[in-house]
Amino acid sequence: MARAAIRSGHQVTMVCGSYGVGKTGLNCPFKFGKRSGFVDGIKVIEFELSYSNRDSFLKRTWLFICFAFRSTLIAMTHNYDVVFATSTPLTAGVPGIFARWLRRKKFVFEVRDLWPELPKAMGVISNPIILTMMSLLEWVSYKSAHRLVGLSPGICAGIISRGISKSQVSLVPNGCDLEIFDNDSISRAEMPEISVQDFLAVFTGTHGQANGLDAVLDAASKLKEFGEEEIKILLIGAGKLKTDLQYRAKSECLDNVVFKNPVPKDELAKILRRADLGMQILANVPSFYYGTSPNKFFDYLSAGLPVLNNYPGWLAELILKHKCGYAIEPDNPELFARTLIDAKNNRPKLKLMGENAKALAKNNFDRSSLSSGWIDWVTEGNKS
């Protein structure tokens, strides 16, 4: 989106923290906990604040607060016309709040997850004082923003339910990076743990509480029970529960499950080219049904992969409407396993689903197309 904004004549400064796999493109050393430079025409300011889903709740909270404080200093001192903040966490909106009320700058807030609704629904946060403070910050962020972006229909509805006018909210979902995944020159990844004849179902993303990946191991156990030896499940990513998942897989002799560390998107494109099916997995939490917009789903579409989704909601409805995969009920490991077997045994149907997935990516979620509307909504014609 930033590159598209630059092509439209805008200047963009991106402020971010650090993440092990998500390289910013800056290689110079940090000075006083910060480094900056230009990457693809974007001025990048990177704080030496390394985030990991493995970190404790307190450590992550401290990192969020530090980032909010330091990025607010940027928002209060730099020259710009529009400040765009994207959550989660909710503290990402703090610079925009200060910029709006103290500098009278235009503030656009993008909501990627509904907080505190989601952590409350998962039981991750139960302290009523913390939940009240987060709810207040959510309300102030929404009320301070001139315009808001929601990544899913449920997120937009959640914003509006807080008293925000529909005219201030726009749905701009995560997009498909077709230039990365839709490339015939991409080679198929070779992995020694997976043979050429194996049917490969892949999950890419965080291995945390929200992702509910025990459901995948439950299905893998059923596959072993059914004597199915030609289906392999690949879990790519990191997260707080990854070690526990690996321990369970080893203790239950689930050799049909392979774990891999996070990889950059160009390497991920090679893996998805080898895969037969992408798995969109989340814990069975009703707040997720319409209130999330997972990047991995759009990567699968970009790669022309059929998708297996294990919870109801807007993505399940998309899959069924466009016939680009399977939408199964949650918490049913036998159905999960039998759906994988059905996919393996019905290659012509699977191929058609993959073609439908690619068509959906190109027709509805091409990021280059979405970026035009996003730029207009965020900038309202300003050159910034």
Image: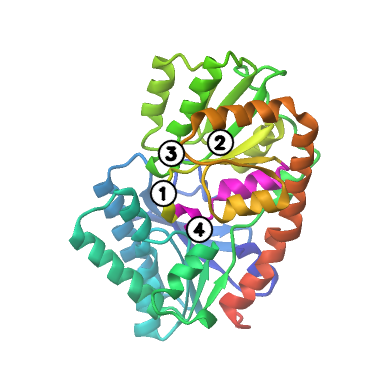
Q: Horizontal placement of 274 versus 90: left or right?
A: right
Q: Main secondary structure of the magenta part?
A: helix
Q: Residue 291: where, in percent of width, then height?
A: 47, 58
Q: Which mark is residue 212?
A: 3
Instruction: Name the amino acid, label 4.
Output: Tyr
Q: Are marks 3 and 4 in contact (CB under 8 Å)?
A: no
Q: Secondary structure at mark 1?
A: loop
Q: Residue 275: where, in percent of width, then height?
A: 67, 31
Q: Nearer the viewer, residue 231 or 1?
A: 231
Instruction: Name the amino acid, label 3.
Output: Gly
How much space separates mark 2 and mark 4, taking CA atoms? 20 Å
The range drawn in magenta is 288-304
Q: Secondary structure at mark 3?
A: loop
Q: Are marks 3 and 1 in contact (CB under 8 Å)?
A: no
Disc 4 target residue: 290
At label 2, counting other C-alpha atoms closer than 10 Å, the crowd grade (few under 14, some 14-19, many 20 or more) is many
